[in-house]
Image (cartoon, rainbow, N blue to C red):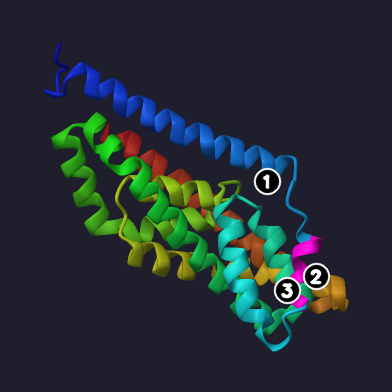
Amino acid sequence: MVDTDGTPETSRRRHITRLALFVAVLSALFYLTAIERVIDVADVRGLIESTGPLAPLTYVAVSSVLGALLVPGPLLAAGSGFLFGPLLGTFVTLGATIGSAVITAFAGRRAGRDSARSLLGPDRAARIDGLIRRGGLWAVVGQRWIPGVNDALASYTFGAFGVPLWQMAAGAFIGSAPKAFAYTAVGSSLGEFSAPLLVAAVVVWCVTAVVGAFAARRGWQRWRSRG
């Protein structure tokens, strides 16, 4: 039996099963790390502090992996601010954000791209490739500004659709900078309270969220009008 895209039915089932398993693994990771909190961020901070002068680089590496495992980014960013202060902490947070984006996109590409392209069919896959070439970078940037969207899960999805790793890295850096500062500044204020810094963090977060929500709404309306 052959489907309308010319793919054998057995192959189609295999691709569906593969994507379903991929989604199930991500769902399990999200439940364990974001809901059950099986990874104690405080213990991670203690481990990082023990590395001395290498602590910032160690935190970038460890947070990159933890972010890819769906540990909430705001907690990791706040930990960076608590350990390194608002200035260095923001750069550490951005380094970890880029690392997580590259790891998750690479994993998504390896685990889901072939299956996603097979299920979409050659015509739709080609259209998506064209969209990525024209605006993949800015799609990543825009996603980072939308409130309530898990960055790691979105990066896995971007990877499955074939967004290049350089676009993921650049988009994560550009799009995550405002919230990286905001969450890191909040964490820094927990260690050494600063009312102006806390106010600045809240203002930056609110502006980013409002702009991101407005842009997402406009994008959705534009897509609906084309449909």
Q: Is residue 54 above or below residue 211?
A: below
The furthest residue to the left? 6
Q: Is residue 161 in view from this perspective? A: yes
Camera-side mark, 2 or 1:
2
Q: Secondary structure at mark 3?
A: helix
Badge 1: residue crowd in 10 Å (few <14, some 14–19, many ≥20)? some
Which stretch did the figure color magenta?
42-49
Q: The residue tagged with tag 2: helix, strand or loop?
A: helix
Please give left or right for residue 92 compared with residue 20 in the image. right
On screen, residue 148 versus residue 133, left or right, reads right
Q: Are marks 2 and 1 in contact (CB under 8 Å)?
A: no
Q: Residue at position x 62%, y 66% from top?
A: 62
Instruction: Compare residues 173 and 159 and report the one nearer the observer.
Output: 159
User: Residue 227, image x and y in percent?
Assistant: 27, 31
Q: How many marks?
A: 3
Quadrant (top left, top right, bottom left, bottom right) of the N terminus: top left
Residue type at mark 2?
Answer: Gly
Q: Which mark is residue 33?
A: 1
Q: Amino acid at mark 3?
A: Ile
Q: Is residue 75 magenta?
A: no
> Which quarter of the figure has residue 35?
top right
Q: Amino acid at mark 1?
A: Thr
Residue at the spot of label 2: 46
Q: Is residue 44 magenta?
A: yes
Q: Quadrant of residue 205?
A: bottom right
Is 108 in front, or is 176? Answer: 108
Report the Cα–Cα distance between label 3 and label 2: 5 Å
Asked if residue 63 is positioned above or below residue 81 in the image, the reply reads: above
Q: Give how far apart the Cα atoms at labels 2 and 1 are.
A: 18 Å
Establish if 33 lies above or below 52: above
The residue carrying mark 3 is 48
